[in-house]
């Protein structure tokens, strides 16, 4: 599944600059305001995170297949969720559903340390290879059920879940710092609402934001299959 390239990946990283600039323009038009997120997406070579045959389509505002029946999230959703986390370079972030590693790379540009989980081992290997390939060293991707969180590095300033959950997984709220934010899609298997949970000293504040469509979050505190 890993794209087989004949030249060094460094040479490929410089390609598609006009497409990348256009993608960022579309993100601005759709209401993304965080300049750090826009700058990260202007620089990160998204085409290296999709199968080689789909590279030319990597900068359209849509999801694309990445194998194992999973998808790389649409650029708008990556930007929107990252913006909603409101993290800075001091922040430790947990990401669930790392897939291709593209969201991981965007997070690594705006936050301090990223711990990312992916339940499909083949994808976790590809994702880890992809982030290293572009020189991202403050993030790591492990194969594990993300609905259980990653207690070793908790509490987190931000938790981003890139797969649709029937409910809010309790372990994730428990691993959130007071003042920290959890952003995730909650709903049925084919339609969800983007939800932001902010942990406070007294409990949590829940905001129901826009509607969205993600693949299923499968695990102990997600869908069973
Ligand atoms: N953000 C990634 C992938 C999004 S698709 C990208 O843009 O490339 C969602 C991913 O969540 C899939 O790869 C799927 O395998 C993964 N996933 C689903 N349930 C999970 C769980 N419980 N723990 C970790 N990853 C999970």
Image: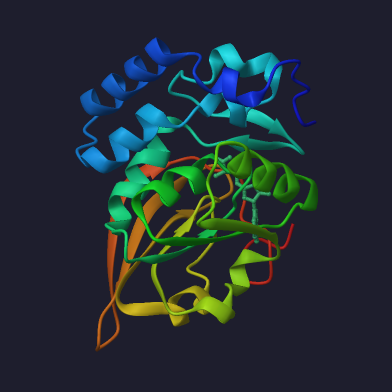
Rendered-image quadrant of the N terminus: top right
Question: Which residue occupies the foreground of this view, 72 or 133?
Answer: 133
* Image coordinates for residue 212, horizontal then vertical, percent: 43, 41
Question: Which residue occupies the foreground of this view, 100 or 186?
Answer: 100
Give the total number of marks visible in the rendering. 0
* Image coordinates for residue 65, horizontal then vertical, percent: 66, 29
Q: Residue at x 33, y 15 (%)?
A: 22
Rendered-image quadrant of the C terminus: bottom right
Residue 100 visible (yes or no) = no
Q: Is residue 110 left or right of residue 150?
A: left
Compared with 202, 36 (above or below) is: above
Residue 122 visible (yes or no) = yes
* Image coordinates for residue 32, horizontal then vertical, percent: 24, 36
Q: Is residue 145 left or right of residue 199?
A: right
Q: Residue at x 53, y 20 (%)?
A: 58
Q: Is residue 103 left or right of residue 35?
A: right
* Residue 101, image quadrant: top right
Colouring style: rainbow
């Amino acid at each position: 599944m890993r794209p087989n390239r004949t030249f060094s990946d460094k040479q490929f990283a410089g390609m598609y600059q006009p497409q990348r600039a256009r993608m960022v323009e579309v993100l601005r038009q759709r209401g993304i305001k965080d300049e750090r997120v826009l700058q990260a997406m202007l620089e990160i070579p998204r085409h290296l995170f999709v199968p080689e045959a789909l590279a030319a389509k990597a900068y359209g505002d849509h999801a694309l297949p990445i194998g194992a029946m999973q998808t790389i999230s649409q650029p708008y959703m990556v930007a929107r969720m990252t913006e909603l986390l409101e993290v800075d370079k001091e922040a430790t972030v947990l990401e669930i559903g790392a897939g291709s590693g593209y969201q991981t790379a965007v997070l690594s540009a705006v936050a301090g340390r990223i711990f990312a989980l992916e339940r499909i081992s083949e994808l976790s290997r590809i994702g880890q290879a992809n982030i290293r390939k572009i020189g991202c060293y403050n993030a790591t991707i492990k194969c594990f059920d993300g609905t259980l969180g990653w207690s070793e590095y908790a509490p987190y300033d931000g938790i981003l879940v890139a797969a649709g959950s029937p409910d809010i997984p309790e372990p994730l709220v428990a691993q959130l710092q007071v003042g920290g934010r959890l952003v995730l899609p909650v709903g049925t298997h084919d339609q969800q609402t983007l939800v932001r949970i902010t942990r406070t000293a007294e409990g949590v504040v829940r905001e129901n934001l826009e509607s969205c469509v993600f693949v299923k979050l499968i695990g102990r505190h997600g869908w069973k299959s």
